[in-house]
Amino acid sequence: MGHTTEILLIGITIVILFFIGSGLLLLPQRVSTEPFEQYEFFLFSTETTHYPTNVTLFASTVGNRTIEVTVDRWNLNFGGFEPNESATRGIEFENPNDVMVKAQLFAFGNISPYLILPEDFLIGPGLSKNISLTLDAKGAVSGNYSGTISVRVVIPRFSALEGVLPLL
């Protein structure tokens, strides 16, 4: 075999290995069930928790009115209040891992247009971060709104991959 042919075969082998490696990155293995999902990838794993959320918006009445308040830290319900008002829930995220992680929040359901979620954020190993979830009912009409807030955490398998997290 000539030198050019050997270089070509090495190049083709590298390309094939690259595509096989890409498949390992993109083909997840599911290792758990709802409402908590965990997927294992070659270089990263993801953990997603789905939290039901709801709010009841009611028309104002003259005199006293009742405001519902939820104090359970795992309950992301916003209670009840008037349209055009807002409510905020605080959540503390903790990273028990020995690597930096990236947290992403997503909202689904008819409540989602009224939710203000934080931008994706990074949490260092062993640290925690307080974030706010706000429900702004501006423009909403009286009624029941519900949905799901999903929290996905991306965890690199190797600390050398922490620098890639902002790009994901």
Image (spheres, grey):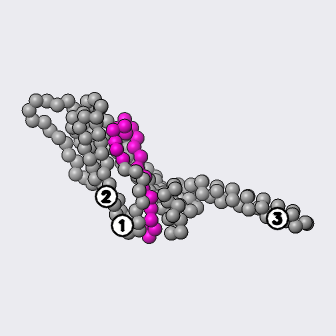
Q: Place residue 122 in its image quadrant.
A: bottom left
Quadrant of the rendering where the N terminus is positioned: bottom right
| Residue 103 counted in the magenta span | yes
Residue 123 position, x and y percent, is 40, 62
Q: Residue at x 30, y 51 (%)?
A: 132
Q: Is residue 20 left or right of residue 36?
A: right
Q: Nearer the viewer, residue 81 or 3?
A: 3
Query: Helix, strand, or loop for circle 2?
Result: strand
Q: Residue 52's x, y, as percent? A: 35, 45
Residue visible at 78% across and 59% down in the picture? 12
Tag 3 secondary structure: helix
Task: Mark 3 and mark 1 in contact? Answer it, CB < 8 Å.
Answer: no
Which residue is drawn at the image coordinates 30% and 31% (left, top)?
139
Q: In the rendered image, which residue does mark 1 sit on?
A: 127
| Residue ID for mark 2 | 130
Q: Give above or below for 79 relative to 155.
A: above
Which residues lie in the magenta part?
97-117
